[in-house]
Image (cartoon, rainbow, N blue to C red):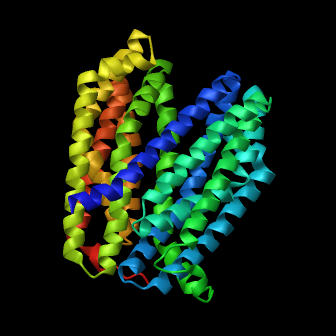
């Protein structure tokens, strides 16, 4: 069992690493243009992350439905769920693209972009956000394949897309296309990835999409949205909460904000394994429930948690032992280094709870129980991370350490709430129809 979980999770982990590295490469090439170019890409990515929250509605919904149908061996229903997911994604992606085309400048202004930064952001935003349907469909197609326990194909396609992106970045910058060229490279790479994923899905051996009559059904759309909307709202709650959270930290001081971003960048790499195990158990739970094997689903969740927790404990130990050295990689300022070291050593103790949150969120969502994780996220982000964070950082004058203690409290409380929900067993009773 451990081996099958590991082989399912490993490609997702590698895929997430590739995605993270791609962001680093884009920032590297943007840095060769101007500081305003980096800022322009950053504000665009901020908006795109919010759009991804909307796209999650379909990707999580499709994962839960397809995994369940796949476990039931109802391949005609699998094909139907894929078609409905792609149709929903098509409408959603085109709609967001249209909004960006008409209100692009106004949307960027909401992020605080102005002057030179706004001028740099506009061409990049338009070329990346208007064809947002490509990203939407790419996410959905990857989710469809993962739901059928194929995590390798999305990893290979992500690697190919990244290679295309990097090669085009070099070509377009040498051609003098500037920040527009970086955006064009990203869009072409996403389009190529989307086409490859669709072809891979089309040629799946277990079924043929073209074998079955195309019948669109309002009830199928309803099931997809019933599961997906709470998952999308959870991501949106988190994204908006992070904006408020970052604003609160900025009010503490510039040095604190810089230290927070550095520590967050370092910690984001720690989250990659936990996210991989979370996505893997989302599929595994759905398939096991489709097979009517609840005991197997429970055991797989337990094993997945311990695999994720052990990984996170090792990473936490590295944070604690090598925090000063990690901080030194990002800044030469002594005060910032000390703050980064302090907060990394705080969060190092709570990595098992981070694993608990990711794995149990994935398990519940895979079972179709997406509302409870949404409620838990709202409580954790807005009451603890923001509310308690403000009290500790400002009222008790604990600064950035207070903010990260509140973050730790969020992980503990959310993890325990999700654990209680999982033990209650209501997720076992959810029917997807």
Please state the horizontal and vertical placement of residue 268, each as a whole percent of the image.
41, 38
Q: Considering only vertical position in the picture, is 304 above or below 26?
A: below
Task: Pick the residue in front: 424 or 61.
Answer: 61
Q: Is residue 211 left or right of residue 207?
A: right
Q: Considering only vertical position in the picture, is 258 above or below 186?
A: above
Count of labels shown?
0
Task: Pick the residue in front: 26 or 402.
Answer: 26
Q: Is residue 79 left or right of residue 325?
A: right
Seen at 28% across and 29% down, the residue is: 319
Q: Is residue 206 left or right of residue 424?
A: right
Q: Quadrant of residue 9?
A: bottom left
Seen at 60% across and 53% down, the residue is: 51
Please state the horizontal and vertical placement of residue 76, each as a whole percent of the image.
50, 86
Query: Where is the C terminus found, in terms of image quarters?
Result: bottom left
Seen at 59% across and 77% down, the residue is: 83
Q: Is residue 148 visible?
A: yes
Q: Is residue 79 left or right of residue 280?
A: right
Please state the horizontal and vertical placement of residue 295, each as a whole percent of the image.
19, 74
Q: Considering only vertical position in the picture, is 206 above or below 155?
A: below
Q: Is residue 121 visible?
A: no
Please state the horizontal and vertical placement of residue 142, each as a whole percent of the image.
51, 61
């Amino acid at each position: 069992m451990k081996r099958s979980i590991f082989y399912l999770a490993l490609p997702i982990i590698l895929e997430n690493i590739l995605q993270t590295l791609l962001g680093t490469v884009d920032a590297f090439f943007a840095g060769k243009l101007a500081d305003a170019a980096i800022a322009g890409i950053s504000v665009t990515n901020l908006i795109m992350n919010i759009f991804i929250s909307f796209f999650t509605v379909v990707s999580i919904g499709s994962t839960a439905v397809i995994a369940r149908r796949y476990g039931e061996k109802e391949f005609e229903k699998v094909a139907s769920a894929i078609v409905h997911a792609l149709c929903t994604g098509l409408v959603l992606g085109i709609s967001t693209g249209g909004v960006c085309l008409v209100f692009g400048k106004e949307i960027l202004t909401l992020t605080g972009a102005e002057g030179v930064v706004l001028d740099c952001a506009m061409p990049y935003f338009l070329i990346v956000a208007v064809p947002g349907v490509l990203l939407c469909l790419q996410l959905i197609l990857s989710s469809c394949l993962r739901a059928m326990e194929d995590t390798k194909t999305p990893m290979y396609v992500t690697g190919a897309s990244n290679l295309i992106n990097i090669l085009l970045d070099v070509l377009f910058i040498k051609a003098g296309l500037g920040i527009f060229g970086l955006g064009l490279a990203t869009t072409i790479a996403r389009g190529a990835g989307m086409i490859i994923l669709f072809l891979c899905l089309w040629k799946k051996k277990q079924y043929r999409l073209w074998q079955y009559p195309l019948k669109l059904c309002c009830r199928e759309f309803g099931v997809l949205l019933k599961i997906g909307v709470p998952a999308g709202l959870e991501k949106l709650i988190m994204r908006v909460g992070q904006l408020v959270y970052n604003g609160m930290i900025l009010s503490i001081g510039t040095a604190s904000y810089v230290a927070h971003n550095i520590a967050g960048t370092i910690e984001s790499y720690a989250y990659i394994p936990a996210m991989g195990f979370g996505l893997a158990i989302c599929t595994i739970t759905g398939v096991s429930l489709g097979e009517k094997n609840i005991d197997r689903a429970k055991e797989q969740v337990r094993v997945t948690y311990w695999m994720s927790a052990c990984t996170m404990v090792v990473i936490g130990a590295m944070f604690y032992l090598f925090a000063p050295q990690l901080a030194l990689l990002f800044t030469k300022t002594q005060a910032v280094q000390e703050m980064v070291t302090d907060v990394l050593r705080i969060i190092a103790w709570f990595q098992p709870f981070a694993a608990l949150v990711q794995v149990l969120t994935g398990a519940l969502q895979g079972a179709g129980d997406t509302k409870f994780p949404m409620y838990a996220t709202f409580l954790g982000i807005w009451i603890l991370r923001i509310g308690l964070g403000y009290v500790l950082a400002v009222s008790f004058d604990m600064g950035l350490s207070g903010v990260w203690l509140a973050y730790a409290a969020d992980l503990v409380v959310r993890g325990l709430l999700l654990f209680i929900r999982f033990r209650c067993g209501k997720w076992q009773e959810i029917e997807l129809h």
